[in-house]
Image: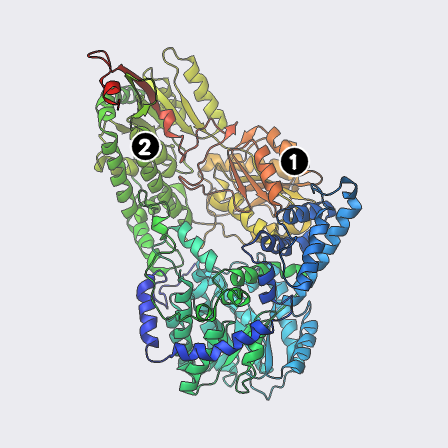
Amino acid sequence: MSLRQTDRLPHPYRPEPGVVQQRLAALEGALDWAAAAGVASPWVRAVRENPPPFWAMESLLKEYPISSAEGLALMRLAEALLRVPDAETAIALTADQLGRADFEGVADSALARLSSSAIAMSKKFLPESSGESGLMTKLGARTVVAATLRAVQLLGRQFVLGQTIEEGMKEATSARKRQSRLSFSFDMLGEGARTDADARRYLASYQSAIAAIARTADPKRSPMQNDGISIKLSALHPRYEDLQHARVMEELVPRVWSLCSAAAAANLNLTIDAEEVDRLELSLDVFEEIAQLVAQHCPQWIGLGLALQSYQTRAVELIEHVAELAHRYQLRFMCRLVKGAYWDAEIKRAQELGLEGYPVFTHKHHTDVSYLACAQALLAAPDAIFPQFATHNAGTIAAILQLSSAKNAPFELQRLHGMGEGIFREVLKNPGVSCRVYAPVGAHRDLLAYLVRRLLENGANSSFVNQLADESVGMDELLVSPLRLDTRQVLPMPAQLFGAARPNSIGLDLAVVAHRAPLIAALAGAGVPTVPEASAQAVQAACARSQMAFEAWNHRAVGERAQILQKAADALQSQLPYFCALLVKEAHKTWGDAVSEVREAVDFLRYYALEAQRLQTPSELPGPTGESNTLRLEGRGTWVCISPWNFPLAIFLGQVSAALATGNTVLAKPAEQTPGVAWAAVQLLHQCGVPADALQLLHGSGETVGAALVAQPDIAGVVFTGSTQVAKIIQRALAAKDGAIVPLIAETGGINAMLVDSTALPEQVVDAVMQSAFRSAGQRCSALRLLCVHEGIADGVIEMIEGAAQELQAGTTSEFATDLGPVIDAEAFAGVNGHVQRLHREAKALLPPAKTNDLPNLIPPQMFEVASISSVKQEIFGPVLQVVRWGGDPMAVMQQINSLGYGLTLGIQTRIDSRARQLAAAARVGNVYVNRNMIGAVVGVQPFGGEGLSGTGPKAGGPHYLMRFCSEQTVSINTTAAGGNVALFTSLG
């Protein structure tokens, strides 16, 4: 499948200070901020003297700041309550959120005081309230929930123009009677598509909206004068991702063009909304395709638009590129400039991927600087772009008026419906200014994610809307000039996420061509090493050499051993493309999984190097005078490390580095399917200073080489990751041996469940299920095996999962577009396929049966609905998900999950915080994940390991892991044996 070969824009992860300096230089001499602040000051005073209605955003934030418990409770209720179908869960959610806050006495205005008093009184009718027990009746609780639902619906009406396009247009007509210079851009609310059915539904919604707008529009007027529509590309295609480039271009462009041609016929403005950074290049490819079609079929139409985000460090270059496209195709575009809507998600993504920097500005005023520089760039290209400035910041608006006046360039302002009304009431007193309202349209339950996003963005302490409502913020502070560079680091760079002592491993953004290039080159040049199998005699000889090497390695200073491992981590980081290529070729890893695994291995090396130094530094213990008591830890001897094929580098190096860091020598047996990756890892460690006899690789089958290693009389311990069955075989073999009791660290699999209640956001559940159940072809110990979904939402959630699973690409893992590759070998295929055939007989199949495929051992996602939790008897190590519906008490469901006997990972999807805490406390599992996926534990952040049938512990990548590899020794010395207690005598005053 073809991919982009070049990037249109500069590298997205450039250092922030350099970019800001460029933006400031471009604005130098072009903007008088003091004059702009002077223009804005009367607007601010007027808004504070005559504030907008109580339900307006500014007033809400004044009464219930997002930083307060009350504001957070209302936000969480607004996000979830309307979608809850059952009364019991709605009561629990309302009690959970209102119980976290104190609404009595927090408000100032009369209406706010009335609202707060009603909420405070309502809390007494809810479960676990401190009110009189006689009031705690089911009727009372249901009444409170009904009232809360009504309040949330009223809140929704303030930020959604109408529940249908007809309602929205009617409200727009009413608004124009109050303010004639208003136009509207309607946005049909909804999440991004997860299924093709979702995408087609959104397409139909857009088509219907355009037809409705066209009926009242005047085609003889320009798109600048008519109302318009905003569309979201990720709503029109379920896989709107850069790595699905060829498919997106083939399937999405015709859909977008159908909307554009309809908008052009009515002379409407159609704006393509902005997406996340990793989709920007893809958006530009789609946009250029549409521009070509416009140039061919309706070149007179000037209504095609694109939203641009100034918080991106590439924003000015993006504007220059869009202007160049306009010139190339002899068109004129309408460009909406916004600050940006995904800042927190962009920050987290960069940290999680270990990127070299952030694609967005980390100082708010740097984004303001960028916005002004972008405004200048837009105004400088009037023949190519009609600028639309979306902002609620009075200072920014005044600055735009100044910049536009200097260039005599046409433009319009924009605001969000329900926000900025006070400021725009004052700004629009200027007859030369027009405003377009970005107006969400849709059912209130569909507005939830949108509403919460707006609240978070504008509720931040640093936002203008928040500060405008806070009269303690003086005019000079509110309108302070953003035109300055701040070199302070307000967020740790991704590489510094874990502090100065342990650098974070550096990853790649596969949406960036320059990041893909070294992987492609490595794949072409890398060959999988051929590793000879060891004999029984070789095992004995290796064990003898390992015993001989132990004393010298154990007596090396822990700092020296740690330095070797740190050197190995740096070497592995520098060879990331090569090891990724090995993982793709030998272990059938997708590129994303391969990058993550190399990073995890780097993290293990660095983490255990630091942990060994912490643990093996002797500790002086308190005691009576006249003696010293020292506790120290040493290596035990020779450890056998038996690692699996599903993480042939990360788990292999995690086991080996833990043993080596603590002074042990290692006999490492890799999985028989993936010896090449292990051999390359051992060579790297040897090159970095680990003695050859301290680390030896012994390749072969578990039945021969593995059994021979476990049977050796002098081994000091065994660390194993694999099946529960094999772990028990090892356990019995060790117990049967004479001599010392040998510790076993075993990490095995599990029937990992996810419990979903009716407050969960379905789209978030689907995203988590796709990652947890089907990523890596389900070949992770942590993978989701059993989905328990509340009966009230089960039909919709299951249908969405079915559709999303069918959008996944199964195939050759060397292709970047592949989501899941084949299972590891024919034996694994036969085992998984046998379970699939059994489930087709015993359960309800929810996905089409696997088709015959030319690629060996390929199993596409499979999903079955089963009758009960107890009917799931064993783990299926592949892309197979079993689903069960539940009702009643979620704690009873948790007890049934515990009864399965496994205890590795658990997912919980709920908006009821107290429920999440209670379920997590009751779960007998090692790792609990709330409102996220269940895979990808990060070293030192989410220590990983289970209990029961899922392993022995301690957790890998955690602070207790290395203890099991050590022997402890206490040394007590009588310091008064010769000459008495000198220290005591000399301490006397």
Identify which amino acid the numbered label 1 is placed on.
Answer: Met
Q: Quadrant of the C terminus?
A: top left
**Label placed on residue 614:** 2
What percent of the width, then of the height, locates residue 319?
Answer: 41, 74
**Label placed on residue 891:** 1
Identify which amino acid the numbered label 2 is placed on.
Answer: Arg
The residue lying at 67 percent from left, 56 percent from top is: 116
Q: Quadrant of the N terminus?
A: bottom left
The residue lying at 63 percent from left, 59 percent from top is: 107
Kindly tell me whether residue 384 is visible in this rendering: no
**Mark 2, other Cα within 10 Å: few <14 / some 14–19 / many ≥20:** some
The residue lying at 51 percent from left, 42 percent from top is: 934
What percent of the width, then of the height, locates residue 210?
Answer: 62, 75
Does residue 876 appear to the left or right of 151 in the view shown?
A: left
- Mark 1 and mark 2 lie on one chain; the one further toward the N terminus is 2
Kindly tell me whether residue 678 is visible in this rendering: yes
